[in-house]
Structures are given as structure tokens and as C-alpha cells.
Image (tube, rainbow, N blue to C red):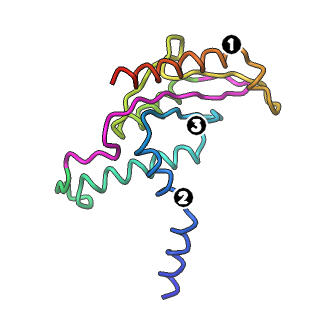
């Protein structure tokens, strides 16, 4: 019984269900994450949890017996964009591409950026607190991409 109560306590402390409920109501998504070596491990864990929900609904365990082959986590193919905040180090678009592919696997549609790395806006900063806000060019790119996402919602 102690195990069941500890699992229930963990479930109450976790806010994934509330976040997912809000996401299902959204018209679009903007994912913003700090880019360290690859992507934030907590952000990747969040995406992995969403992907696990989809996988387990589509398949019955690991026997490839389909239970809901057309299951979608989100009711419609909402558009999304990605903003990656990188410090002074080099930015590899492959690391962000991995994040984008994960998100696309959830059934969402990428709204790409007009400048390299195209799959995201890279807001380069220094390592100090508040330096993101000093990157005027990066913030302008974020604004432009956000407008593209809003326009894609209006078209649908």
C-alpha cells in the first residue's frame, strides 16, 4: 500500500496533465528553450513523455498490435515554432533539428524561420543575466517568426 500512495503523491506533484490540457486548447505553440550542448534535458524529457503517450495509445505494449492506429495527441495539426537561446558557444542546427523532429512526431506543423538555421530562431547571447534582452536582432527575428505563426493560425 505504501507504494501506491507514493505513486499517487508523485502524480499529484506532477503538472503534465494540466500542461497537456492547456496545450490541447491552444491554437499554436512556441517552444523556447536554452540550448546548452544539445537541448535542455528537462525539455527533452517533456517531449519524450508526450511521445510516450502517443506511442502507448497507438500500440498495445510492444507487440505492434494497434489499438488506436490513428490516435492524435492534439485534435488538429497546430502550428509551432522554436526559439533556441544559446550562449557564447557554437550553435549546431542539428541539435535543434532533433527537437523539431520530436515535436513534428506529435502531429504538429513547423512554421520555419526565414534565416539560418530555418528550423528555429537562434537568439545568441552572452552568459550574463538579461543578455537575451540586449540582442535586438534576435528579438526582432523572434517577433517576425511569431507573426508567421499567428498568420498560419488565421489562415486555418
Q: Is residue 89 magenta?
A: yes
Q: Is residue 153 magenta?
A: no
Residue ID for mark 1? 137
Q: What residue do we see at 48% from left, 22% from top?
A: 119
Residue ID for mark 3? 39
Across and down, in percent, residue 93 comes to 53, 23
State which quadrant residue 65 falls in: bottom left
Is 12 situated left or right of 53 in this image?
right
Foreground pick, 61 / 4: 4
Tag 3 or tag 1, which sits nearer the N-term? 3
Q: CA distance from mark 1 to mark 2?
A: 34 Å
User: Regarding mark 2 in the picture, which secondary structure is present there?
Assistant: loop
User: Regarding mark 3 in the picture, which secondary structure is present there?
Assistant: loop
Marks 3, 2: nearer the viewer: 2
Across and down, in percent, residue 60 comes to 23, 60
Q: What residue do we see at 60% from left, 15% from top?
A: 141
Residue ID for mark 2? 15
Q: In this picture, which residue range is highlighted in magenta? A: 69-91
The local crowd at label 1, few if under 14, some if 14 to 19, many if 20 or more residues have their Cα within 10 Å, is few
Is 53 situated left or right of 149 in this image?
left
Q: Is residue 115 above or below residue 45?
A: above
Amino acid at each position: 500500500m505504501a507504494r501506491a500512495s507514493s505513486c499517487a503523491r508523485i502524480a499529484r506533484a506532477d503538472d503534465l496533465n494540466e500542461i497537456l490540457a492547456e496545450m490541447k486548447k491552444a491554437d499554436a505553440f512556441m517552444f523556447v528553450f536554452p540550448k546548452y550542448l544539445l537541448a535542455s534535458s528537462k525539455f527533452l524529457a517533456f517531449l519524450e513523455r508526450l511521445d510516450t503517450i502517443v506511442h502507448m495509445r497507438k500500440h498495445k505494449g510492444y507487440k505492434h498490435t494497434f489499438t488506436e492506429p490513428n490516435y492524435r495527441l492534439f485534435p488538429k495539426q497546430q502550428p509551432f515554432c522554436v526559439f533556441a537561446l544559446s550562449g557564447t558557444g557554437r550553435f549546431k542546427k542539428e541539435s535543434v533539428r532533433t527537437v523539431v523532429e520530436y515535436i513534428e512526431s506529435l502531429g504538429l506543423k513547423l512554421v520555419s524561420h526565414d534565416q539560418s538555421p530555418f528550423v528555429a530562431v537562434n537568439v545568441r547571447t552572452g552568459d550574463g543575466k538579461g543578455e537575451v534582452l540586449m540582442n535586438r536582432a534576435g528579438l526582432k527575428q523572434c517577433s517576425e517568426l511569431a507573426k508567421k505563426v499567428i498568420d498560419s493560425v488565421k489562415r486555418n
